[in-house]
Image (cartoon, rainbow, N blue to C red):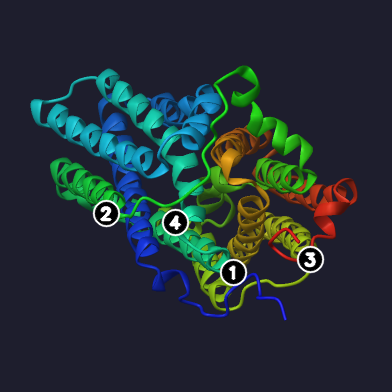
Amino acid sequence: MPEPDVSDDRFAAFRNRQFVLYWLARFAATFATQIVIVSVGWQIYDLTRDPLDLGFVGLCQFAPALVLVLVTGAAADRYSRRGIMAAATAIEGVGTLLVLFLTYRGLSEPGPIFLVLVVFGIARAFFGPASQSLVVNIVSRRELANAIAWNSSSWQIAAIVGPVAGGLLYGVSPMVAYGLGAVLFLAGAVAVILIKAPARRRANEPASLQTIVAGFRFIWKEKVVLGAISLDLFAVLLGGAVALMPVYARDVLDAGPSALGLLRAAPGFGAIPMALFLAAHPIRNHAGAIMFVFVGLFGAFTMLFGLSTSIWISVPALMLMGASDMISVYVRETLMQLWTPDDVRGRVNAVNQVFIGASNELGEFRAGSMAALIGAVPAVVLGGAATVAVAGGWAVMFPALRKAQRLARD
């Protein structure tokens, strides 16, 4: 009987010391990022009182990943992924110390912080493909699905707790917030350095336009990977409702600012238990069909949230959205890593990182612009309906993905 492609042990990945170090490093870096970005947002808005400057905070982080997409993935395939991950995390730590120094000296305008955020964005652009590709090199094939589930849960925890911690620490003192952020970044860099250099297949072909765009060519050729990445892009682009949560908290639910934090945290409260469930009960059959079903449910629960006028319905709807999204993310990420050869994995992950960033950033713009034209409720409901339609359409357009049984390539 062939060995199963996923482990039954819910803690399988954590029995691997290298993954423990990797997980701690990613969690520390993600938690620190949340603290720093929330603190920077508060600080810049205190300085300028201009909401447009908050948009520049996001742009400074996303633009480098888009501009450098052909470089960051190639670097992750050609050079040490562990070294890139450690260097990027350390650079973010140094950048945080620089923001702390600027704050201590009495910052009077946001320009210097924007420059630091661009450096942050460059570091994150290299961090993403390297870290996503490194996990495949340090865990076994059977441990990978379990590792992805635990990685997803750590990101959700950091995304929920990090902004709260950032706000509270900034309220105590900006110096405290940035100081802790720097410590976490540097601790994460040390954890990465402690990971043993893994064996891997490197891209040895000489640098050329062909090798640089190999990630795009592979994604276009491999329809399972193309379908999974593009499905997530359009589902989040059309179904994202995060940008409109302040409108719902204030005008639709009439619940006040205290409800906004609950609304923002609700998807995470649904995603974390689902990630833990998937760690213990990995998907073994009908992986592609399951992903399509839960992308469709993500859209349906988005519609339910959009139509709700009661926080007692809105919060559970958002939790179910988070749980559904976690299942689709788990299947997509595992399929992508297991179906992609190691020598192009960095380049494929770089493209995926840009797609994810674009779907989140453009999704917020889509929601905000539609709300300005037709109102918040129609914008969310139509977006959810479009996500359901995308799930159905992609199931027809990508039959190989729909028919994929196991997470690993047979």
Query: Label for residue 155?
Result: 4
Q: Which residue is mark 2?
A: 194
Position of the C terminus, as image quadrant, is bottom right
Give how far across and how far down residue 33 sits, in percent.
34, 44
- Left or right: 384, with 240 as reference point: right
Query: Hey, which quadrant is residue 40 in on the image?
Result: top left
Query: Label for residue 218?
Result: none
> Visible in this render: residue 112?
yes
Pointer 1 local density, CA inside 10 Å: few below 14, some 14–19, many at least 20: some
Q: Disc 2 on helix, strand or loop?
A: helix
Q: Amino acid at mark 4?
A: Trp
User: Of discs 4 and 2, which sits in the foreground?
Assistant: 2
Q: Amino acid at mark 1?
A: Pro
User: Of discs 4 and 1, which sits in the foreground?
Assistant: 4
**Which residue appears at 54% of the width and 73% of the height?**
279
**Which residue appears at 69% of the width and 62% of the height?**
407
Do tag 1 and tag 2 residues touch (Cβ < 8 Å)?
A: no
**Which residue appears at 42% of the width and 31% of the height?**
61
Give how far across and how far down residue 209 sits, in percent.
62, 18
